[in-house]
Image: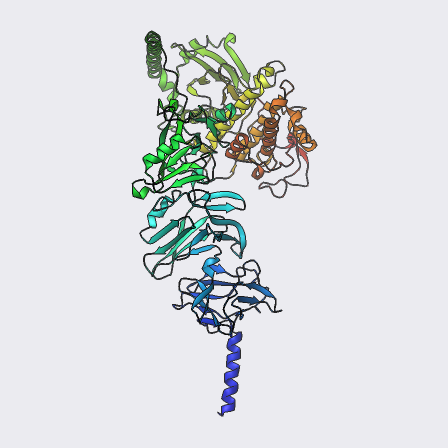
Amino acid sequence: MNKEMISKISTITLLLLSFSPFAIPIDTLSSAQNLTDGETLLSPNSVLELGFFRRGSSRNRFVGVWFTFAPDTVIWVANRDCPLKNTSGILTLNKRGSIMLYDSTGRTVWSSSSNSSSDANDFSPILQLDDSGNLILKDQTSNSIIWQSFDHPTNTLLAGMKLVKNLRTGFETYLSSWKSGDDPSEGNYRFEMDTGGAPEIIIWDRSQIIDRTGIWSGQYFSGLPQMLSYNKNINYTFMWDKDKVSYEFEPESNSTLSLLVLHESGILKRFISDQSHQTWAEILLARTGNCSQYAKCGPFSICQSDDVQPCSCLRGFEPLTTMEGYLRNTSGGCKRRLPLGCSANSDGFYQIEGVELPYSHNTTIDASISLTECQSRCLLNCSCTAYAPLDIMRQGSGCVMWQTVLTDVRTIEGGQVLYVKVSKSELVNAGTNHTIPSTNHSISRAATIGIISSSIILVLLISSIVCLLWRKKMRNSKQGKNLKYFEGNESLQGTDLPVFDMDMILEATDNFSNTNKLGEGGFGIVYKGQLPCGQEIAVKRLSRESVQGLNEFMNEVLLLTKLQHRNLVRLLGCCIEDNERLLIYEFMANKSLDFYIFDATRRASLNWTMRLEIIIGIVRGLLYLHQDSRLNIIHRDLKAANVLLDEQMNPKISDFGTARLFKREQGVINTETVIGTRGYMPPEYILEGAISVKSDVYSFGVLLLEIISGKKNQGNQNLLAYAWKLWEEGNIIKLLDDVIECSPFATEVMRYVHVGLLCVQECADDRPSMSSVFTMLSSDTLLQDPKNPWDGTIIRGFPSECSYQHDSSTMVSVDQVTITRIEGR
């Protein structure tokens, strides 16, 4: 083979390599070289490389840095907001000391904008990828760094990279999320330093805070105590002085790789690789539980993540309004009960342990003073609201003082101590969050009150003993008659069944006298009675023709025996003898809700505040059934007649004969028997027998509109269609009952009607959960627009997006639908 042939083969080989996607990588790039699509720049240890890439099905191409053993782990992107449209991109260096990225037309797609001040004749730029992941542009002549990627991070913080803010020049670095997993362009979330007080790092969603690290405690961020669980592998450095604030980390072992990534969902994640670099351990650095939302509980309140209702006011503070206090809603914040006197004689402090310290913006810091001096300064500063040690690792040295409201206080495991300033009157009884009663009573008055109280307690104790002895005797006498109905029912095993004797019920109700009759329905008659111990009761006597059979009777006994909630009626016992089936309840002095809201005269006694309290009570009861009880229950027959009212007009949901148990992972239960009340049943239940928690939501929506309007959604009156008409006209305030003056409550009324319309939407999936309903009714959250509700009379056929669909070509009346049973009661 002659020399000419060898030369031609070599030329062809080089050309093939230049176009191959597997081209030989290089370790440096000089101004005389180009990096094209398919070529890569390797770090010295070959763990990292720079090159062109794309994600998913997108054709857009980007220049970035990734791990050679994990190409999907892209840690930095150059042209994230200016993608290349094909594989003709060229990365090169110009003579002025900038990295340039050109497309196929020669247009500049991205540049480092890092012009050198050196003389061009003496300037020799070179681009290198460091083993740390830092892409460095430097001058070979002076060995000085001109530009580096560590000063321009994207969504990843690497070991040795600093998140920094220069307080003198304003220069700062921050992380910004990708738009999506396939799109590295800048997303909605930023992770950046807040230096407006004690420095901490904030996650922003555009202009809204969604999470924060808390202030640096000396070893970890106060809001991220989980950092301690892996600090044996990583060293953290957080520094600040009058010129600069910075945060960085370094693994203790050179063989360990660690990344901090701001995910496209706005969640911060820590990734740590093993020594073989084959797997990544992922650690979420995010809030969890009921307090996952930033500042969920508002100023001067605290969020406790292990509580069903997590928000409460700090001691010495109270809800902004009486209504918010009733709703136990502090999302709008709290206010002081007693003003501060701005002196050591009038004010004091109490401590809260195990909390993430409040948002530190506008705080005052002094690292040189003791905690005692910190307290003294806060006490004499009229605007100081709280203080805390700055560095808990040095016996609580230093001082941080809050000058304004306390925002985003939450309990966390491994949390810190916060000292809150209140009037000394609030510290008389340190164990309560309520106003301390006055103690200026004479001894004689106190003694009198003690004697009276002791007498009352003694009488109640004797009455209770008499009642217990009577019940025990009753059970022992005829319990066998009742229990034979319960034998073999596994669901009732272990249940402490309250069994009453028929003779005693006859005596209590005066032999079911008409004078004791409270009401009547399809199930039978309810009587008032009085037990020998003086307790008033309500006895539901199921008629022999009642649609509620023995199974439904037993179902109600089972459920009400196991359920305990202030907004559920309490079952005292049952009785089954011969053909009699009796349920004995606590007596409700004010009968049922329908007794008031559908009566032209009596509904005037329910003002707006009372109706609001009734609505919220019903919501709490349903929320307990769906989510918070030991059993998860769908009521299936929520209506005005099944909401009873006690002496204080507190609502209690009753009639659990048709209720169904469900598992939380179950979405929908199918039943062949449709049982309920016209006007309250959703379309998917009537047509398909499909029930879910959203069935109760629909019934609640109807009931909510009935309570507001005083109108019944039955017969010739179509309340839902009327409410929708007013919505479209922008006049929903007109739905309010005429007996109520609307002007003081217009905003609340419109919001409650809005929520009611959301609850009665035709598609079950469009309806909110009861927990969402509670939030919407008790806060100012933004509500979506409702869709046209099912009017309750004509089945139009479900929209295509509904989970359950009927033949959309038909339009039939509800009366034409074949239903096993609809009970109108």
Nearer to us in this view, 693 or 290:
290
Question: In the image, what residue occupies the spot 45% across and 18% down?
Answer: 585
Q: Nearer the viewer, residue 564 or 368?
A: 368
Give the vertical position of 28 relative to 276 (above or below).
below
Name the one closer to the observer, 329 or 610: 329
Give the colour scheme of this rendering.
rainbow
Image quarter where the C terminus lies is top right
Q: Quadrant of residue 132?
A: bottom left
Q: Is residue 94 above or below residue 193?
A: below
- Asked whether residue 711 appears in the rendered view, the answer is no
Residue farthest along the right direction in this orientation? 729
x and y percentages locating residue 490 in the rendered image? 38, 31
63 to 594, vertically: above or below: below
- In the rendered image, the residue lying farthest to the left is 395
Q: Quadrant of residue 111?
A: bottom right
**In the depicted view, which residue is nearer to us: 606 or 194?**
194
Side (left or right) of 393 relative to 269:
left
Instruction: For residue 300, say whether it is visible.
Output: yes
Q: Name the image quarter holding residue 566.
A: top left
Q: Is residue 662 above or below residue 108?
A: above
Image location (x, y in percent) of residue 94: 54, 70
Residue at 41% from the left image edge and 21% from the top image edge: 435
Counting labels gives 0
Q: Residue at x 36, y 47 (%)?
A: 227
x, y percent for residue 109? 58, 64
